[in-house]
Image: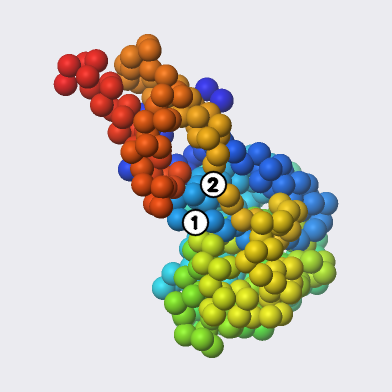
Amino acid sequence: MRLSNEEAQKLIHTLRSGTSPLYQSNAFICGREKELDEYHHCLKLLDKGNGLVKLITGQYGMGKSLLVNAFKQIALNEDFIVSSFQINNGFRLNKIEDLYYAIMHNLTLKDNRYAKSSFEDIFELWVENLQGAPYADRKRYEVNTVCQELSRYNMNFARAFLTFMRGRIQRNQEMTNVASAWLTGEHHIPFELKQKYNLSGAVDKTSTLDFLKAFVKLITLLDYKGLVVFIDEIDLVLGDRSDFRQNAYNNLKHLIDMTSTGEMTKIMFVFSGTDQILTNTEKGILSNTPLAQRLNFDSVEALEQNSTHQTIMPLSSLNANELIELTRRIVRIYRQNAPLPETLDDLSLYAQIVKSINESTFATRTYVTKLIERLDYASNFIEGK
């Protein structure tokens, strides 16, 4: 994959700071062929109507974020809608009713992958086509057909979507905004506005997953292949209160049950975090037996035999050959915007960098930042800086 000079410069700048790039990850990702193949396999299963959960784990700095970012771009290229967020003070996995809100406020579309997309952005092309239709009957038929499908999942959702579409087609901005806010899980909508537009109910603990199923059905009716949800830093649940932590594990178990039984289709949840979520036997997944059983995870030692087809996807460290290939790719990208000695040797660079890093603290992130540091030194030397 050939990058423009501007893309190459941004990529090197991102790597220099020790951060995983959001885009162009495939330009230098190495040693993750099995994981990438499995992910492509998962997307094919989604397209056929399955639901899935994956848990990516690994030590800090091993390359989880890079792999996840590559996964996001692949999903977008394959015409899935992506939602991506972290477990933090704004979203905790122990409250399932907050899941829908987090998903709906962190959407990304293929045509606007460099910024978050709003709920309204999803329907832009469809609404334009409806507004341009020569017959009003066609507008009513298409909208009513979609709403009839949605009513199978949640009647209140279907009614709110009908209100949303009426607002868009009639160019009634207030109606559109109120219905959109309701559909995306906002709780602070004035009562008089909900009453004015006949909106009843709200996203709560009992309706969250019904709303999510309705939304996935809605986007597939618009020819998207499905929804892929990325939730990072799942290991933060280890710091939660015991009852909160067990609620989080029970919610994760519930998502696995619903996707594996076919109750939730065309949606994939990709959780990621450090391997402490697995290795901490007191507070980690092993502390919740039903979840551990769903994950086919009974001991830390069992991970060594774990297949990429399993729900848990543990990442191993890159080997010497993979790090040398990584070095070659980064050097090639670096050369697009800065001079380097022609005699610069990838194997020698690898040996020098590995020697300079303490074995006990070795991580791919550390290796890459050290590599950029050496390339900067070599480039500055040539330019006489």
Q: Residues within 10 Å of mark 2 (few under 14, many from 20)?
A: some
* Residue visible at 42% across and 19% down in the picture: 345
Position in image of residue 328 (x %, y %): 48, 25
Q: Mark 1 — residue?
A: 59
- Amino acid type shown at disc 2: Ser
Position in image of residue 326 (x %, y %): 50, 32
Q: Toward which corner of the image does residue 93 lie, by quadrant? A: bottom right
What colour scheme does the image use?
rainbow
Residue 250 visible within the image? yes
Please tell me which of labels 1 and 2 falls first in the chain: 1
- Whether residue 6 sits left or right of residue 317 in the image: it is left
- The answer to whether the residue labelled 1 contacts the one labelled 2, judged by CB atoms less than 8 Å apart, is yes
Residue 126 visible within the image? no
* Residue visible at 54% across and 88% down in the picture: 243
Position in image of residue 194 (x %, y %): 55, 79
Q: Secondary structure at mark 2?
A: loop
Nearer to us in this view, 126 or 133: 126
- Amino acid type shown at disc 1: Gln
Q: Residues within 10 Å of mark 1 (few under 14, many from 20)?
A: some
Q: Mark 2 — residue?
A: 317
Cα distance in 3D space between marks 1 and 2: 9 Å
- Whether residue 331 sits left or right of residue 254 in the image: it is left
Which residue is situated farthest in the bottom direction here? 243
Q: Quadrant of the N terminus?
A: top right
Classify 302 as above or below 109. below
Q: Secondary structure at mark 1?
A: loop
- Whether residue 352 sits left or right of residue 4 in the image: it is left
* Residue visible at 39% across and 51% down in the picture: 361
Nearer to us in this view, 262 or 187: 262
Position in image of residue 234 (x %, y %): 53, 67
Q: Which mark is residue 377?
A: none
Which residue is situated farthest in the top direction here? 342
